[in-house]
Image (cartoon, helix red, strand yellow):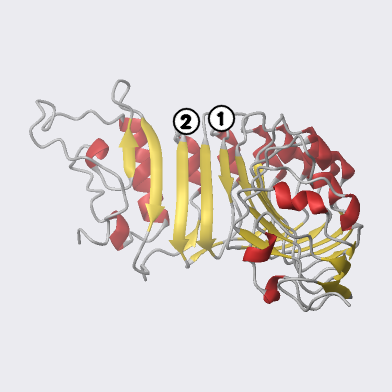
């Protein structure tokens, strides 16, 4: 059974003087038992014995001083045939929660519960690799303490709510691998600088990338595998410190010759678009570039010599209009 629960964090205080006294808040315990019932008493929660102190249960963590439940992390490395149903509405009745995670639970279905809006102390919300569906809820913008929001690998659909930009402490936003449609909200340009890493890949987003995103300087941007059009040059800039940009497999069309690249870039992927112009010689000054791909575009001219550009093979450059020079064929 230990391997099953290996990733649910808990320390058994076997030698503590409190080992045989109840520290857990009775209301929190009542809520947790309701959650267990709503999820059909899954094997993952077998340790949730009402005769034991709930601060000693798997998947939960109590605050050391207040003994209120501050973390509920439900994840399974082995598919749990029992754990099925929707996210229990009663999760909203754990008012001290700072971390709430549902991960790799394929039989978790239904929408993201509105009661989650009550969890005003929440810093991390992860619902990933499940089969939840419905929209990304507007109310998530009310969780002002959120730092990490990961809703990746689900069946969420509809537009991205503009209210997410109202999260002042957000460091990372992951909405990838869903079925989201519509544009990237223009409001995303008003994230508090430098702005969170924004991962929106593998959706069906369309329209232009908002020019307002030029105000941000996030660590990572991944808009790949969507239907985005037009310009992406606002994502770049000499004064930025962004490390990873992936806008591959879209319908983007802009002049690469005029783009100024941050020297902090580690990974740049522009493949499968309609990008034109030439590769700027300034890219040779990007000293830490480890991944690079501009294939399947409409680029022309000689690949600049120097820096790290010749360290990438022909596959990083091929299927362009008239690119030439090492590692491709020499220019005529």
Q: Are marks 1 and 2 in contact (CB under 8 Å)?
A: yes
- Circle 1 residue: 120
Name the mark nearer the viewer: 1 or 2. Answer: 1
| Relative vertical location of residue 104 with respect to residue 67 in this rendering, above or below | below
Report the side of 165 relative to 320 (left or right): left
Whether residue 201 is visible: no
Q: Quadrant of the N terminus?
A: bottom left
Q: What kind of element bears circle 1?
A: loop
Numbered label attached to residue 95: 2
Q: Nearer the viewer, residue 280 or 170?
A: 280
Q: Residues within 10 Å of mark 1 (few under 14, many from 20)?
A: some
Whether residue 79 is visible: yes
Q: Residue 13 at x, y = what percent?
A: 15, 35
**Which quadrant of the figure has residue 53?**
top left
At 33% from the left edge and 47% from the top edge, which residue is drawn?
59
**Which quadrant of the figure has residue 297?**
bottom right
CA separation in Å, label 1 and label 2: 7 Å
At 37% from the left edge and 71% from the top edge, which residue is drawn?
81
At 40% from the left edge and 43% from the top edge, which residue is drawn?
72
Q: Residue 226 at x, y = what percent?
A: 77, 65
| Relative vertical location of residue 27 with respect to residue 224 in this rendering, above or below | above
| Relative vertical location of residue 235 with respect to residue 303 in this rendering, above or below | above
């Amino acid at each position: 059974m230990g391997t099953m629960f290996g990733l649910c964090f808990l320390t058994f205080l076997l030698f503590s003087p409190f080992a045989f006294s109840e520290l857990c808040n009775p209301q929190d315990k009542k809520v947790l038992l309701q959650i267990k019932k709503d999820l059909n008493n899954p094997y993952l929660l077998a340790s949730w014995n009402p005769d034991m102190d709930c601060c000693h249960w798997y998947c939960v963590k109590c605050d050391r001083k207040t003994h209120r439940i501050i973390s509920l992390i439900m994840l399974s490395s082995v598919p749990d045939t029992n754990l099925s149903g929707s996210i229990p509405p009663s999760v909203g009745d754990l008012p001290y929660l700072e971390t709430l995670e549902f991960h790799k639970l394929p039989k978790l279905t239904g929408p993201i519960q509105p009661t989650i809006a009550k969890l005003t102390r929440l810093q991390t919300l992860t619902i990933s690799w499940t089969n939840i569906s419905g929209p990304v809820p507007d109310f998530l913008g009310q969780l002002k303490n959120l730092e990490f929001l990961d809703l990746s690998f689900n069946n969420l659909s509809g537009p991205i709510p503009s209210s997410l930009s109202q999260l002042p402490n957000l460091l990372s936003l992951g909405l990838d691998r869903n079925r989201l449609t519509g544009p990237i909200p223009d409001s995303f340009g008003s994230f508090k600088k430098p702005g969170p890493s924004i991962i929106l890949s593998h959706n069906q987003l369309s329209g232009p990338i908002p020019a307002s995103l030029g105000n941000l300087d996030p660590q990572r941007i991944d808009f790949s595998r969507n239907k985005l059009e037009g310009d992406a040059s606002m994502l770049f800039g000499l004064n930025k410190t962004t490390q990873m940009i992936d806008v591959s497999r879209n319908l983007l069309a802009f002049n690469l010759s005029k783009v100024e690249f941050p020297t902090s870039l580690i990974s740049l992927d522009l493949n499968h678009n309609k990008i034109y112009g030439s590769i700027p010689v300034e890219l040779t000054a990007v000293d830490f570039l480890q991944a690079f791909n501009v294939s399947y575009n409409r680029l022309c001219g000689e690949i600049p010599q120097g820096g790290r550009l010749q360290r990438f093979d022909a596959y990083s450059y091929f299927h362009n209009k008239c690119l030439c020079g090492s590692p491709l064929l020499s220019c005529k």
